[in-house]
Amino acid sequence: MGVEGLPILTTRRDAVLAWGRKNSLWPMPFGTACCAIEFMGVVSSVFDISRFGAELVRFSPRQSDLLLVAGTVTFKQAPILKQIYEQMCDPKWVISMGVCASSGGFYNNYTVVQGIDQIIPVDVYISGCPPRPEAILQAVLKLQHKIENPGTTPAAQYMVKEPKFNY
Amino acid sequence: MDGQTLMEKISAKFPGAVKGSVDRFGQLEIQLNADQVPAVVKFLRDDAETAFDMLIDLVALDYSAFPNHGEGRFGVVYLLKSLKLGHRAQLKTFVDEGDPTVPTISDLYANANWLEREAYDQVGVKFSGHPNLKRILNHHEFVGHPLRKDYPITRRQALSANASLMDEMDVRLEEKGWI
């Protein structure tokens, strides 16, 4: 709220930080499979993730704060993912994109980690094989809500009330 | 050259090497003694009439759940092709569970190096004389051979740290004269 007669706006420090962070997520794509190709579609101009402030894709974990795990993670790959997560500076968030990263998907076998949450903490999961670009945008919105309101569920406006397409 | 002629050619050069043959969908599968595989493959590669200059694939199979497969638990299949003459050959050898060892052909075909490593990694067939017989697909802390029929498919084995792979890189760097 502003102070009477002065060009000043008062707020809480945490709220300002969260507002800045949620609107300038720098994603680091950990792409191991076709979900990474779908992520390229989200970044490109048709869907345009930059509308939500997350367009600056960094390929270094030290410059990014959003780890986007897109694709199958095998046990051979798992220590690499863990190391990349640990190289990221706090605060950091993780989106698990697609069923392979979220649960292993149909790779119920001896090579694939059954969900990356067995290795690193995950903030938002996306279903789909691969997910539609809209689903990734919604995940970014949900993550933004989570950053702004720690410890709450997503707001009602992000929930789909009626399906737009009747498949 | 058809399979029958090829088998007669091998038999004439190496008596006792051919143990049998099966017609697989129009292609003759020639079954060989495991010990004589490198000599036969080298002969087939260098002979002007056969000239198999390409190794298409080398796979190992576990026949333990297969009815009436004959002697030997594991089969190793060699698929050869001649780019000059356009014909193919299918060679197979069986090895026992107790000592699943086949002599290597990695000195004859460069791609056999990795194919034999894959066969060793997944099925557990050993290739004697191989320069670097270690796992290629599964990680280095993996125990067992996952494509054996007695390996439970969902037995997962976690990896603590990645291998550096510098032992292989050093060889290549040295080959190219960079170190």
Image (spheres, coloured by chain):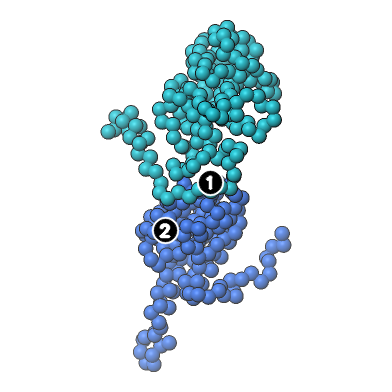
Chain colours: A blue, B cyan
Location of residue B79 (image quadrant): top right
- Which residue is label 1 attached to? A111
Q: Please say whether residue B69 is visible from this viewpoint.
A: yes
Could you tell me which residue is drawn at 49 percent across and 15 percent down? B39
Q: Position of residue A29 (x, y in %)?
A: 46, 55
- Which residue is label 2 attached to? A85
- Residue A16 vertical placement versus B98 (above, below): below
Q: What residue type is labelled 2?
A: Tyr
Q: For the residues marked 2 and 1, what is the alpha-carbon distance in whole angstroms?
A: 21 Å
- Crowdedness of circle 2 by 10 Å Cα count: few (<14), some, many (20+)? many
Q: Please say whether residue A47 is visible from this viewpoint.
A: no
Q: Where is residue B60 in the image (x, y as percent from the top left)?
A: 56, 30
Q: For the residues carrying marks 2 and 1, which lies nearer the camera in this image?
A: 1
| Badge 2: chain ID | A
Quarter of the image for the C terminus of chain B: give it: top left
Q: Element type at marker 1? A: loop
As drawn, the residue found furthest toward the left would be B179
- Crowdedness of circle 1 by 10 Å Cα count: few (<14), some, many (20+)? many
Could you tell me which residue is drawn at 48 percent across and 27 percent down? B127
Quarter of the image for the N terminus of chain B: give it: top right
As drawn, the residue found furthest toward the top would be B12
Q: In this view, does B16 lie to the left or right of A92?
A: right
Q: Which amino acid does label 1 sit on?
A: Thr
Could you tell me which residue is drawn at 61 percent across and 19 percent down? B31
| Badge 1: chain ID | A
